[in-house]
Amino acid sequence: MARKKQSEKPKRQAIPDAYIAGAGIVEEEKITDTLEKNYMPYAMSVIISRALPEIDGFKPSHRKLLYTMYQMNLLNGGLTKSANVVGQTMRLNPHGDSAIYETMVRLARGNEALLHPYVQSKGNFGKAYSRDMAYAASRYTEVKLEPICQELFRDIDKDTVDFVPNYDNTMQEPTLFPTTFPSVLVNANVGIAVSMASSICPFNLAEVCETCIAVLKNPEHDLISTLKGPDFPSGGYLYYDEDELKKIYDTGRGSVRVRSKWNYNKEDGCLEITEIPYSTTIEAIIDKIVDCIKQGKLREVSYVRDETGKDGLKIAIDLKRGNDPEKVMQKLFRLTPLQDSYSCNFNILVNGKPRVMGVREILQEWSNFRLSCVSRRLQFDLKKKKEKLHLLLGLKQILLDIDKAVRIVRETEEEADVVPNLMIGFGIDEIQAEYVAEIKLRHLNREYILRRTQETDQLQADIKEIEETLTDPKKIQKIIISELKETAKKYGQPRKTLFYYASDLQGEQEEEEIPNYPVHLFLSESGYFKKILPASLRMSHEQKLKEDDRMVCHLETTNRIELLFFTSQQQVYKTRASEFQEVKASVMGDYVPAKLGFGDGEYVVQMIATMDYSGDLLFVFANGKIARVPLSSYATKTNRKKLQNAYSDKSPLVQVLQIPAEDAACDVFVRTDGNRAVLLDASLIAAKATRDTQGVQVLTLKAKHAVCEACLLDAEQAAQLKKYRVKTIPATGGLAKDLPSSGQMTLLSE
């Protein structure tokens, strides 16, 4: 046997699982306990320390970045590379350089995301209105603070706000900024936390300051008289809906409608869009326009392109000849994000707690916060002035005998005894004596000491004034108002977003915007719908259908016709022929339940077409009753797509017949499965106002029999079947032995 080498070590034996403490043991724990320990701290961190703005108008990431720039002397100094700022900010914000730089980009003037940018920029910072226009890397761009930041940091070094240690406890950072104006309402702020979100629209700085002053003077001030409405950095036109604005001002929730600014270039025959809603981008608008062109909804547009350049945003939309640019623009507003809504949700952190507040409540909370900042500043100034006065009063004692002070210092043997000897010699305290002892030899003259001690009278007057101010909230309020006026005067600017009113919408007829041309409409028994142009139908009229399917409706009409699809669940879905694409007869077409979003198991019973909702509908039920309902009952002022209780559910629906307004006294033929038939004048059935009326009894049915068919007849057809006519209802009806069997009444429907 070969001897083992001495260098070889014996292999370690694996320790059995039985000897490992707790190995293989699974402890049960409630999911609620797991969520409380693991998820809740994360959720609270996102809500409080990341996603929601505080009353000063900033999220922590914004505040850390701006404070770092302030500490780097970028408020008064020159531009520096963005990378330098990003690196310094990481001392306060440990979330990585890319996240910090993205925050800076949004705050920069070049990005145009804020009404009043906080960062002055040089280089490419992208654009808020473009999805694809990327910003340059931080090593290429330069930044400094905008002058308006002076209002954010004013007196921040005078203990106006609390400071806390940073994440590694190496420096201090402010918890809030002592802003001299309600910045929370001036710049847009959007954040998504856990289970809650915030979306604050921007308002004009001058209007916000004016409104805040008015609320300070009168808490019941009418906000809408001074705060006209949101003012977006992207401009555009805001729809002035006073009721909706009041709702936003009162509750902090609601939405405003903004549309683009445009003009028509007659020479080039194109629409030029120069301002778009704040909530969309150039690319989103162009993509939607292209999509509508492909779907045939924008036949008036031949081409769309992005002409944004050094002069700013510009979208050019080429129109085909003969189109009215005003009507095309109204259509674009309806179909594309050229008109969009901005949802408001004023969710703000106040003392660490999220609160959804209206504008008045926000201004009051900001005023309370600013009151605290000014009070703390006054307390700081008061303390400093008292300390200075105390020193000067000690210096004043020296004026009584300068020679004595010099003699005391000269004759004192040890340096440590100078201050105690001065305290004894002049009856002053240690702080005053220390101050006197530090005076330079050149200042030990009567002129210097007199000049310094003359300040005591002014200091005493200032201290008295500050103490009176601190005890009177009205005086502090006056300071806040004066600062608001100063800020509004210095940084206020004209509105970028103008208004349009309800009167401007008059004449915008949606129907006129829909192209009007002849079409053929087909509906199959299974619910497949086709819109075919006459030329296409002439080329190929053979309809493609599913197996065992058949066409049950064919209409020759126009593209502007409105369609009502009655369903098996007593509902009616409203749409227009223009909402469907033109197809060929050789395709299946659109499946109506899927196109209109029917419920489970719901299918089409009947399709009715109308242009003006005139005339009546007859609902023929299996129990022999017929309900007559004016078609106008289905017309709505709003653009509702679905109406419930479209007809009665007391008996199965057999047929829906449409009676034109000009033929109110037409003849109705009804037949039962017992081979009995009735011909009656439609005027015998009175119209009911309610859509789900049960109607009147027309046929007296025998047990186990039901109505199976119904149709409208013209005069010639009615003459052929006059023997079935009845003058009163209900009627038993006559035997229809000479008519085709049930389901084959082709003579009557042609």
Image (cartoon, rainbow, N blue to C red):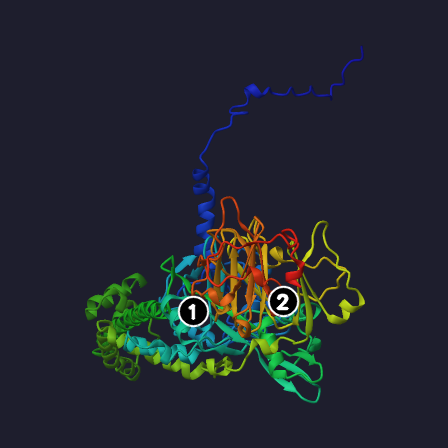
Residue 678 % position (x, y): 54, 58
Which residue has dot 1 on it? 184
Between 142 and 536, the one nearer to me in the picture: 536
Amino acid on which disc 2 is placed? Glu
Name the quadrant containing residue 721: bottom right
Q: What distance separates the C-alpha of mark 2 from that of mark 1? A: 43 Å
Figure quadrant of the C terminus: bottom right
**Label 2 neighbourhood size at 10 Å, few (<14), some (14-19), many (20+)?**
some
Q: Is residue 65 left or right of residue 402?
A: right
Which residue has dot 2 on it? 579
Q: Residue at x 60, y 54 (%)?
A: 736
Q: Across the whole image, how many numbered discs are drawn on residues?
A: 2
Comparing labels 2 and 1, the label whose residue is closer to the camera = 2
Residue 403 can be seen in this image = no
Residue 654 % position (x, y): 55, 54
Q: Residue furthest bottom?
A: 267
In this view, 546 is above or below 558: above
Q: Is residue 555 left or right of residue 21?
A: right
Q: Secondary structure at mark 2?
A: helix
Q: Residue furthest front?
A: 723
In this view, 734 is above or below 455: above
Residue 490 % position (x, y): 43, 83
Q: Is residue 83 left or right of residue 60?
A: right
Q: Is residue 427 left or right of residue 319?
A: left
The numbered mark, 2 or 1, whose residue comes first in the sequence reads: 1
Amino acid on which disc 1 is placed? Val
Residue 709 % position (x, y): 58, 55
Q: Secondary structure at mark 1?
A: helix
Figure quadrant of the N terminus: top right
Name the quadrant containing residue 575: bottom right
Between 724 and 596, the one nearer to me in the picture: 724
Between 215 and 719, the one nearer to me in the picture: 719
